[in-house]
Amino acid sequence: MEYKQLMTFHKAAEKLNFTHTAEQLNFAQSSVTAHIKSLEDELGVQLFDRLGKSLALTDAGKKLQIYANQILSLTNEAKKAVMSGKEPSGTLVIGATESLCTYRLPPILSSFRHRYPKVRFHFSPGTSDRDILRQLEKGSLDAAILMDVDLIPSLFIIEKLKKEVINVVASPDHPLFRKETVNPADLFEESLLLTEKNCSYRRQFDQDFLSCGLIPEHIFEFASVEAMKQCVMAGLGVAVLPKITVKREIKNGEIRVLPWGGTPLFVHSHLVWHKDKWLSPALTAFLNLTRETLKE
């Protein structure tokens, strides 16, 4: 018993005329006749009395009509339920390092919540880009926004988003502001407040020193950008931080950007997801909105 046969029977039972049934379903009349005959042969009963050009349901036909109506109704409900899944819904788990999670994701979330209220978000700040990549590989995350993609294996899809400028900063009264240009050698004896070694812009900064044959002696490593900012404002040293993380403090005069004479420091934020990840309607919407918000 096939869906098309039941649909034909349902319409024929309603119209009680094979010609009108064929017109309504856009079938050839021979197809309507064949569908009904196949049903009757399979069930071993006659479903219609043929009274000249008119039709009448037999008792067996009346019984089948009840079930056919239910089957077709449930089929339509199933289609609607599945098709409604195309509207973004469910939960997305998005990973990002602290700075991106704090300063780049909120405007995306605000727009997304307005457009797609049925989607729930869970943000998972990672301790490092590598930590986030491990979560992506395990399937714990749907997607991530990262700064460091130098070491990302081929099992991920990567899209470049936005250039992130990195600033060398200090408290406004730091003696280094007397200089027109600050070079790596000028920081050799300073207390340097840095992120962990596996951070992309930390590696760039370290390379500037190595190219001068210098290894700084007074390094304090932090896992928290906010802790670094507080230490800078307290006058405890010079820090290397993404511009987005110190924008407000610079505007308020709490932190100043040193005139860095070394290699210009910058990275790019990237959108990353597993190449085998199914792009659900919710995830597709998130990827598109992130591109729309951040892509240059």
Image: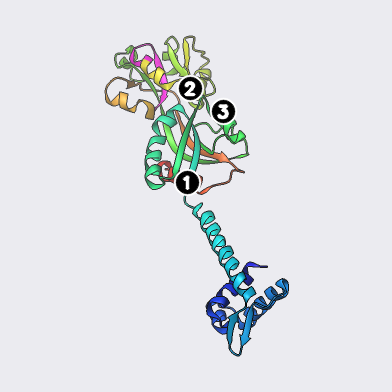
- Where residue 178 sits: x, y (%)? 31, 15
Q: Is residue 64 above or below residue 251?
A: below
Taking the image as shown, residue 192 lies to the left or right of residue 132, namely left
- Where residue 28 sits: x, y (%)? 61, 81
The residue singled out by tag 2 in the image is 205
The residue singled out by tag 1 in the image is 89
Q: Is residue 47 above or below residue 266?
A: below
Taking the image as shown, residue 163 lies to the left or right of residue 75, namely left
Residue at 30% x, 17% y: name it.
Answer: 172
* Cβ atoms under marks 3 and 1 closer than 8 Å: no
| Residue at the bottom extreme, as displayed | 52
- Where residue 159 sits: x, y (%)? 51, 42
101 and 268: which is toward the camera: 101
Q: Between label 3 and label 1, give the one nearer the viewer.
A: 1
Taking the image as shown, residue 122 lies to the left or right of residue 115, namely right
Work out which quarter of the rendered image holds the N terminus and state it: bottom right
Q: CA distance from mark 3 to mark 1?
A: 29 Å
Q: Earlier in the sequence, mark 3 or mark 2?
A: 3
Kind of residue at badge 1: Ser
The quarter of the picture where residue 193 lies is top left
Residues in magenta, as a range: 231-243
The residue singled out by tag 3 in the image is 130
Q: Earlier in the sequence, mark 1 or mark 2?
A: 1
Residue at 43% x, 9% y: name it.
Answer: 189
Residue at 60% x, 90% y: name it.
Answer: 52
The quarter of the picture where residue 30 lies is bottom right
Label 2: element kind: helix
119 within the magenta span? no
Q: Which mark is residue 131?
A: none
Label 1: element kind: loop
The quarter of the picture where residue 175 lies is top left
Q: Is residue 146 visible?
A: no
